[in-house]
Image (tube, rainbow, N blue to C red):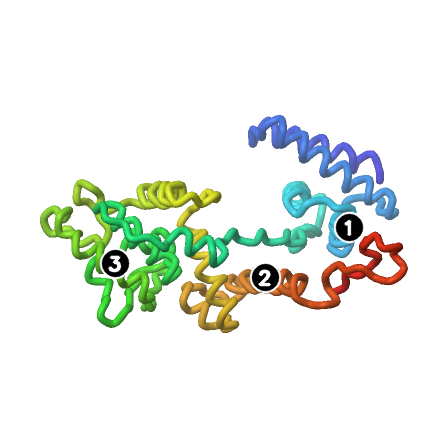
Amino acid sequence: MDKHAQSLIGEFIRKLRTERHYSPRTLEAYQRDLQKLLSFCEQAGIENWAGLEQADIRRYIAGRHRQGISSKTLQRELSASRSFFAWQLKNENLKHNPAIDVRAPRSGRKLPETLDADQAMQLLETQPQELLMLRDHAILELFYSSGLRLSELAALNRVDLDLQEGMVDVIGGKGAKDRRLPVGKKARLALQRWLDQRADLVSGSQSALFLTRRGTRMGVRNIQLRVKEWARRRGLDRSLHPHMLRHSFASHMLESSHDLRAVQELLGHEDITTTQIYTHLDFQHLAEVYDKAHPRAHKKKIEGDGGTGKDTNAKTR
């Protein structure tokens, strides 16, 4: 590339420093990102910034991705390029911004943490007697039974719960959407035991389903702390949070029913692709079952190993 291309980078960085007051660290990153793009252009035989096309940007990002550069870093590099070219466009150095519609590859989604069925039983199989423990048990049972979000459970009123029908109404959930959810037998029993004692805490005309010791509605932070404390008392070797119970509900439902649409409705997901992450958890479970159960999957002694029992390529999938 010509010397003018290099000088434009320096001029752009100075503008970010003096007019936009970017931090030194951000300026260093932008400088480094644009220098890498300039090196790519030189290797590709592109003589100036005006000769850079969108296809070139895509090829550059794809090459960086193949080198193992993270999606987060590539997003920052594209942000630097878009800003740089927008500045040139404003100054009439360019006729178009070649990076404007280029997106970095999406990073892999982290699988949600869940409890297995045994851990769920360890957590919930108990008959508490003390008032607040009855309340906390009902909270955990309802989380696991119906897959509510933390904010949804905290917002529940007594009238939203119909134990006779075994249903709970979630009013104004995420996206301002209402939904009606089933409540399982174990959760109904725990909720009934709590409701039998709830009157002892009610202050005035308090409508909240779950109350503090002072008779006021429980907040989300209070619920989080009580869930974590419950897990500690039950000897669960996990840092439990309400969303883990929601994830466990979804994973166990999908594992048993294989009905993705039904689980989507129960969770209140707008887009089924959000629910599809639980299919990866289900596959993970199936893979573990396969490894343990399939006669050609696990290690075994074969002829010719000298009686050592060493695995010589016995494991297949």
Occupied quadrant, residue 30? top right
Residue 135: % across, % down = 26, 50
Q: Nearer the viewer, mark 2 or mark 1?
A: 2
What residue did someone put label 2 on? 285
Secondary structure category for the residue under label 3: helix
Q: Nearer the viewer, mark 3 or mark 1?
A: 3
The quarter of the image holding the C terminus is bottom right
Under mark 1, the amino acid is Arg
Could you classify mark 1 by the number of other residues whose Cα lies within 10 Å: few (under 14), some (14-19), or many (20 or more)?
few
Q: Nearer the viewer, residue 222 or 302?
A: 302
Are the residues flagged by discs 2 and 1 in contact, CB closer than 8 Å?
A: no
Q: CA distance from mark 3 to mark 1?
A: 53 Å
Q: Which mark is residue 191?
A: 3
Q: Which mark is residue 66?
A: 1
Is there any visible trace of residue 39 in the rendered image? yes
Under mark 3, the amino acid is Leu
Secondary structure category for the residue under label 1: helix
Could you classify mark 2 by the number of other residues whose Cα lies within 10 Å: few (under 14), some (14-19), or many (20 or more)?
some
Q: CA distance from mark 2 to mark 1?
A: 30 Å
